[in-house]
Image (cartoon, rainbow, N blue to C red):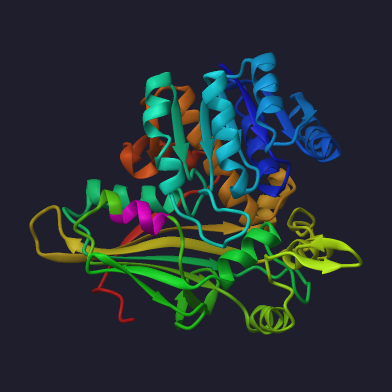
Amino acid sequence: MSKVLVIGAGGVSSVCVHKMAMNPDIFSQIHLASRTRSKCDAIAESVKQRTGQDVATYEIDAEEVPAMVNLIRKLEPSLVVNLALPYQDLPIMDACLEAGVDYLDTANYEPKDEAKFEYKWQWAYHDRFKEAGIMALLGSGFDPGVTSVFAMWLKKHKLKTIRQLDILDCNGGDHGQRFATNFNPEINIREVTAPARHWENGKWVETPAMAEKVEFEFEGVGPKNMYMMYHEELESLARFNPELERARFWMTFGDEYIKHLTVLQNVGMTRIDPVKYQGRDIIPLQFLAAVLPKPETLGETTKGKTNIGVIATGEALDGSGEKTFYINNICDHEDAYEETGNQAVSYTTGVPAMVGSAMMLQGAWRGEGVFNMEQFDPDPFLDMLGDQGLPWNVKELDGPVPF
């Protein structure tokens, strides 16, 4: 039984805290903090109604390291779970280092002024965390997170090596809005509008954003257009699987989303540099995020399913030649909402955040330093993931992907 401090109060945090409260034998005390305490209070009230468990709440600016250190020292948690914005990762890691507490997040760091997310900034903390005798687990969401664990499960149980790997992220849900993002609008749009990159023959290949499109038939959803993007797990997968010849990430988007996003780009609303307005500097994308529907409000109206998985081709473990396997999860938006009050996009990230926390607190995954999901045994994580609402399936395909 352990005390945890969760930072952030969006949809992912809501799911994670609900699932922690459903596992009181692991999470004995849950503390929740964000810049807006009322959001924490709303999550705590929902948790109390659904589970009977109490969640203590606090107001904190995650970028104010001294204040974070004071809160951590006051509460003395076993683990800080960072579910805030990616550009708050480093300040929270700094606070954990100073306070001597383990750290977990779901997305890697990116600077505020540049839509470029890489692990180099957080990997640079490895020696300091090791010297402090504490652990940081990076990217314990679904993608990144489960997708990396899926790949390593295939490498442990099915494939001796992975030659080609494709991550396929499909959200087949319909929330009834003309335009809305299913997770934080600022982070979502920064990701989508950044140039695409994939790993091929030992180097990164960059292409224009949304330039590569393929139609794919997703079980439980149907045919969807998916677009090649860059996603951070490609970097860690390439690092920990040096035999990879090619690794790509694909995400589905509907025609309406693409149309609206194109217009917003054309009129400058996706810019992340300051614009002077009535004597004040504003960031257009941050203003846009403020007027778009909040992802945590979409759960009640969202119907349909998500389907996220990995297709990997490589040398079979049993020596039978080259084989291709597809491992994935299908999650229902309405089921996720019924259980936690949040839609499936938040659910598929919040549950792995809870499971990763449990792996650390129970000692199944331990180490001193900064670690990625690929560095640990995939079995206990995926066993618990299935038990906690995200069951997964694996099947052999006829051959490598044709695209």
Residue drawn where x is 62% and y is 31% of the image: 20
Task: Confirm whether residue 366 shows in the render.
Answer: no
Task: Confirm whether residue 254 shows in the render.
Answer: yes
Q: Is residue 75 left or right of residue 245?
A: right
Of residues 364 and 74, the one drawn nearer to the viewer in this rendering: 74
Count of marks placed on residues: 0
Q: Is residue 111 above or below residue 402?
A: above
- Residue span colored magenta: 233-238
Residue 169 place in picture, x, y as percent:
50, 65
Q: Is residue 305 above or below residue 297?
A: below
Query: Which quadrant is home to the C terminus?
Result: bottom left
Residue 227 place in picture, x, y as percent:
49, 77
Q: Is residue 144 left or right of residue 319?
A: right
Q: Is residue 46 left or right of residue 238?
A: right
Residue 55 place in picture, x, y as percent:
75, 26
Residue that protrudes farthest toward the right in the picture: 278
Name which quarter of the figure residue 134 lies in.
Answer: top left
- From the image, give the main secondary structure of the stretch colored magenta: helix
Residue that protrudes farthest toward the front in the picture: 279
Name which quarter of the figure residue 34 lies in.
Answer: top right
Residue drawn where x is 63% and y is 63% of the image: 188
Residue drawn where x is 61% and y is 65% of the image: 190
Residue 306 place in picture, x, y as percent:
57, 63
Instruction: Tell me, yes or no, whether the highlighted magenta stretch contains residue 58.
Output: no
Residue drawn where x is 37% and y is 69% of the image: 198
